Amino acid sequence: MRCPWKWILEVIKLSYRLFWGFLSSRIGFKVIFTIIALLSILSYQTIIHINNPIAYLLAYTINNIGLGGLMVIIPNVSLLIFGKLVG
């Protein structure tokens, strides 16, 4: 029997990646990268300074959402910079 939570989590991850892709096409790479960098810094600082398991889980989740956004926007920017011949 398959675990239903795994399917639900995959759908949530997919929705965040679609969100980052939509946002990237609307406001541009530099703004999106800045937002993701700020999310990563915020989550890192939260993990370092707060010893609360719930805050750790929230910071870990926020960091993974930002990393998923990088996985969406970096290939498009690489294509724009290097062209179709590379890769």
Image (tube, rainbow, N blue to C red):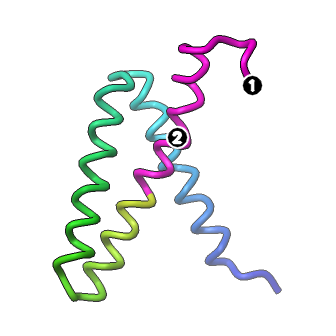
- Could you tell which of marks 1 and 2 lies nearer the N-terminus? 2
- Tell me if residue 10 comes above or below residue 80 in the rendering: below
Q: Image check: 53 left or right of 60?
A: left
Q: Image check: 48 left or right of 67?
A: left
Task: Provide residue 17's location: percent of width, then percent of height.
Answer: 52, 45
Residue drawn 62% across the image and 62% down it: 10
Residue drawn 18% across the image and 81% down it: 50
Tell me the CA gap for discs 1 and 2.
23 Å
Magenta residues span 65-87
Label 1 SS: loop
Task: Provide residue 41's location: percent of width, then percent of height.
Answer: 25, 56
Return the residue found at the far left. Answer: 49
Task: Provide residue 31's location: percent of width, then percent of height.
Answer: 28, 29
Question: Within the magenta stretch, is there residue 85?
Answer: yes
Rate crowding at label 2 as few (under 14), some (14 to 19) or many (20 or more) other CA atoms within 10 Å: some
Give the amino acid at mark 2.
Leu
Q: Are marks 1 and 2 in contact (CB under 8 Å)?
A: no
Q: Quadrant of the C terminus?
A: top right
The part of the image, by quadrant, that contains residue 55 is bottom left
Q: Which residue position is annotated with label 1?
A: 87
Which residue occupies the foreground of this view, 2 or 51?
Answer: 51
Q: Which residue position is annotated with label 2?
A: 18
Which residue occupies the foreground of this view, 13 or 60?
Answer: 60
- Tell me if residue 27 comes above or below residue 1 in the rendering: above
